[in-house]
Image: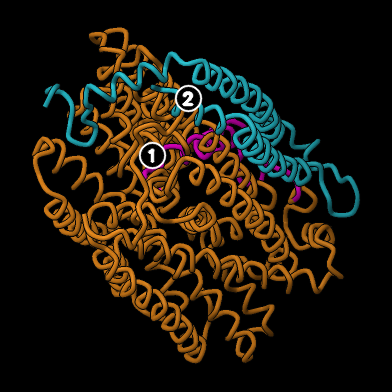
Chain colours: A orange, B cyan
Amino acid sequence: MIVAAGTAHGLTLGVFAVILAMTLAITYWASRRTRDATSFWAADRGITGAQNGLAIAGDYMSAAAFLGTVGLIYLFGFDGFITGVAALASFVTVLLLLAERMRNAGQFTMADVLAFRLNAKPARSAAAIGTLVVVGFYLIAQMIAAGALFEALAGITFPVAVVLTGAFMLVYVLFGGMIATTWVQIVKAVLLMTGVVVLTVLVLRRVSWNPFEVMARAPAHSDAGDAFLAPGQFFKKPLDSVSTALAFLLGTAGLPHILMRFFTVPDGRAARRSVGWAVAVIGTFYILVSIIGFGARDILATAGEKAAGKGGNLAAPLLAQNLGGGAGTFGGDVLLAIISAIAFATILAVVAGLVIAASGAVAHDVYTNVVRGGDTDEGAEVRVARVAAAAIAIVAMALAILAGKGFNIQFLVSLTFAVAASANFPPLLLALTWRRFNTTGALAGVAVGLVSAIGLIILSPTVWPGPDSEGGPFPIVNPAIVSIPLGFLACWIGTLLGPPEEVDRYTELRVRADTGFGAERARTPTAGSR
Amino acid sequence: MEDDRRDAVNGTGDGRRTDVAAIEQSDAYRSLVAQRRRFTIIASAVFYAVFAAFVALASWGHDLMGRRISGGLAVGYLAALAVIVAVWLVAFAYSRASVRVFEPLAERAREGRD
């Protein structure tokens, strides 16, 4: 924990208040434009490719991506970089297989695509469950991270910090819907990139602008020595890194809050362009973060390990303080405050995106299309969405506070990606590409993917048989290497066992996904009411 | 509602179904599907081979990945940068193919439906 004086806390809160004021202004502006379901979930489909690319980056670069990656590289060297590379690589899957097709085939949620060609009610329900599990676990993980960070960096107690995070997230979503959420994510992406660039410049300034010099100097300050630049410090067993890389590679393609972003652009072309912008930003981000991580090892050295906390999450703020002049100096306090405030903003933008995706699953999928069979108006749908968002936020806050700041967040994050990759991705991909695929296959895939991912995580060394366990019955930290194939296998077996379905709807889905014919149209914000 | 299993979001009129059939049988659409499939298969094969090689080396090739090329630059870091650049190249190539080939074909397929 950082031994920050009262001035540092005050400064952090001050900078954070400025960012919050900005996001509230955005929310007020957005609230006046939010009038129906298309505004609430899809920002009127009026976000440009470049804007959406930044928003995707803002949605994807979570606190784990920034604080977690810097921390892991600081503590374990090269291994910390592997998840970043895999996370970026996942966008190839999204670009080649999903982005344009999702935009053309869906309306508001991932479930729309499955319901288009399968038996709508069961398929929608299954996809909604997959969405809620992934989003729910990720939301709780982010809330715990937010609370722990707030407490360490701003001196606010954990429960109060969790409630504050939840409250602001709800304000964005309830009043500003997807329009506010999108712009909060864009602002956050710009702030985070600025912060990362500033830290990189300060690190490189000390080594005559040669990034490899940072890496040359880092091993001398680590107990691992030269092995710091080699893999194997964090992932002890080969299958650990393989499975984790696989979970990140395919997990993104099943993250509902990322996929939902493709509904906010006018057409398939803009969806494709947004991935181009997103990989440019996220790739640059990870390269800079790697330099910061190795720089942290060079500058903070072994002495800083204790202060950086478990998982090294506080390495980035500590480094900022050090680069600004050190603890107690004005420059150190200011830079610490700015980086801390950006980290909070990062979490807020991510949780807002998560809640809006969950509200879509509850209101659009379950309420409107399953419970009411489509027989409802948009006003009611958006009202239910707001109630659902509030309920989900309150449950997430309560669970985060109950779990407490010591809870193993890594477990929740691996679970999120493993479930997304094993339960959401296989049915989605097969619905878009396999002619024979049917409802039974989708239900089997979601069920088996969900149960195997959750079950194997519980049996894995991270959890079983308790804290700091040395090994559970399932030997690998991330279940993806087993649960993803199981998810696909269940889709296949279910399809063979279930009754065949008419192919007309599949043909229509393909034509729509490939050409954009019949896709939900964009509208201009000034086009008047519907 | 024509079909009980469908929900309101994706309701289909008979007219649109005829259009869909026409598009599906058009040469432009067939060509679009074939060319995009070809691109996806080649791009995926190349990219996932690069990615798999990176992950395999990071998992089993610790010594090779830790070898210094010059100064602080190790093989592992260079390999990671190579994967990032490969992502950018795939995005660039797909974007170019879309503008030059896929989008014109999709437009022809949509327009030629009557």
For label 1, the residue is A464
The quarter of the picture where the C terminus of chain A appears is bottom left
Which chain hosts label 2? B
Q: Is residue A31 above or below residue A434?
A: below
Quadrant housing residue B112: top left
Instruction: Specify the principal SS of the magenta part.
Output: helix
Q: Is residue A231 magenta?
A: yes
Mark 2 = which residue?
B109
Callout 2: few (<14), some (14-19), or many (20+) C-alpha neighbours within 10 Å?
A: many
Q: Is A183 placed left or right of A139 in the picture?
A: right
Q: Quick check: A256 left or right of B11?
A: right
**Residue at 73% of width from left, 71% of height from top?**
A201
Observer able to see residue A162: no
Circle 1 residues within 10 Å: few <14, some 14–19, many ≥20: some
Instruction: Count up the numbered dots.
Output: 2
- Name the residue rendered at 78%, 53% in the picture: A225
Residue A517 on the magenta span: no
On the question of residue B93 being in view, the answer is yes
Q: Is residue B46 above or below residue A434?
A: below
**Image location (x, y in percent) of residue A2:** 53, 77
Q: CA distance from mark 2 to mark 1?
A: 55 Å
Q: Chain of mark 1?
A: A
The span picked out in magenta is A229-257
**Residue at 17% from the left image edge and 35% from the top image edge:** B8
Q: Amino acid at mark 1?
A: Trp
Q: Residue at x 64, y 90 (%)?
A: A329
Q: Nearer the viewer, residue A247 or A180?
A: A180
Q: Is residue A262 above or below residue A11?
A: above
Element type at mark 1: loop
